[in-house]
Amino acid sequence: MNKKWTKWILAIAGLLLVTVVAGCSGNKTVATLKGGRITQNDYYKELKSSSAGKQQLQTMIISKALENQYGKDVTSKQVDKEYNKYKSQYGSSFSSILQQNGMTTAQFKKNIRTNLLTKVALEKNKKISDSDYKKQWKSYTPKITVSQITVSKKADAQSVIDKLNNGEDFSKLAKENSTDSATKNKGGKMTPFNNDDTAVDAALKTAAFKLDKVGDYSSEPVKTSVGYSVIKLDKKPSKGKMSDHKAELKTKIYASWMQDSTVMQSVISKVLKRADVSIKDDDLKDVLAGYVTKSNSSKPATNAK
């Protein structure tokens, strides 16, 4: 399970538990047992005093504020597209992963929507400067295309290299020897990637970018997480001009900022300021303290209308 998946699971779990807390406004019985009962008020008092409960309330407030301010900017088609990406990535195990984490399809889609709303909020509240583009451009590399032959043993990979040295065809050898079902029947050809693509094995990526000329292949077996690979360079475009890659650079910059806690804290602070949040329970008045800016720190949350 990757980090993004885990992060989203934790977020949706928080929303679900806070929904329960929000409903605990009376003295109805939650559970009975010999010697007494547990009421909604009892449960609420315990939950609101915990750090987890406070964090979950914070998550719910932020999500509602994002929905109110940017809800029109995220469509159901966008949510479905992201959902289908994860469904495709996890394949047959997708449903079981949802079940293991106590989530339904609707709940996971709600979580995806919140994530997309956060991206919109970032783009609306923080613009990219020329210096941001130039900084990203320094580390930018265009996507390259390579073919791979993956085998389980180092000796088998060396055997493939020996055959290539003797003039045998890479595509033919891939179809005959590769254990990678996704690329085998395509002569080993992989989807184009760049140097910061996390979906590609790190060792394979490093070896691929060391190849200089189209047609070059790795001179020795490359140890990867699934075995050993032999890699051939199919296409390696020149870097070109920064102006030709503005759209891609923009995507990379915003993706980086989404992972920057300082940047996102600033963005969410602006969202919450516009939301004019009013915390009615004095015990929870500091639940948004982490997002209160210095200019607003003198205004207690309980004073909001």
Image (cartoon, rainbow, N blue to C red):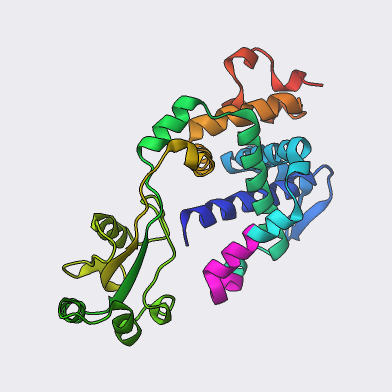
What residue is drawn where x is 71% and y is 22%? Answer: 301
In the picture, measured across the screen, residue 128 lies left or right of residue 17, that is: left
Q: Which residues are magenta?
A: 82-96
What residue is drawn where x is 51% and y is 26%? Answer: 129
- State which quadrant residue 224 falls in: bottom left
Residue 297 visible? The answer is yes
**Residue lying furthest bottom in this view?**
176
Q: State whether residue 257 is above or below residue 155.
A: above
Residue 111 lies, in percent from the top left, at: 66, 52
Residue 65 lies, in percent from the top left, at: 73, 35
What residue is drawn where x is 69% and y is 50%? Answer: 113
In the picture, measured across the screen, residue 244 lies left or right of residue 174, that is: right
Quadrant containing the C terminus is top right
- State which quadrant residue 210 falls in: bottom left
In the picture, measured across the screen, residue 225 lies left or right of residue 113, that is: left
Q: State whether residue 160 is above or below residue 133.
A: below
Q: State whether residue 61 is above or below residue 202.
A: above
| Residue 90 lies within the magenta run | yes
| Residue 60 lies within the magenta run | no
Q: Looking at the magenta stretch, what is its main secondary structure? A: helix
Residue 54 lies, in percent from the top left, at: 63, 38
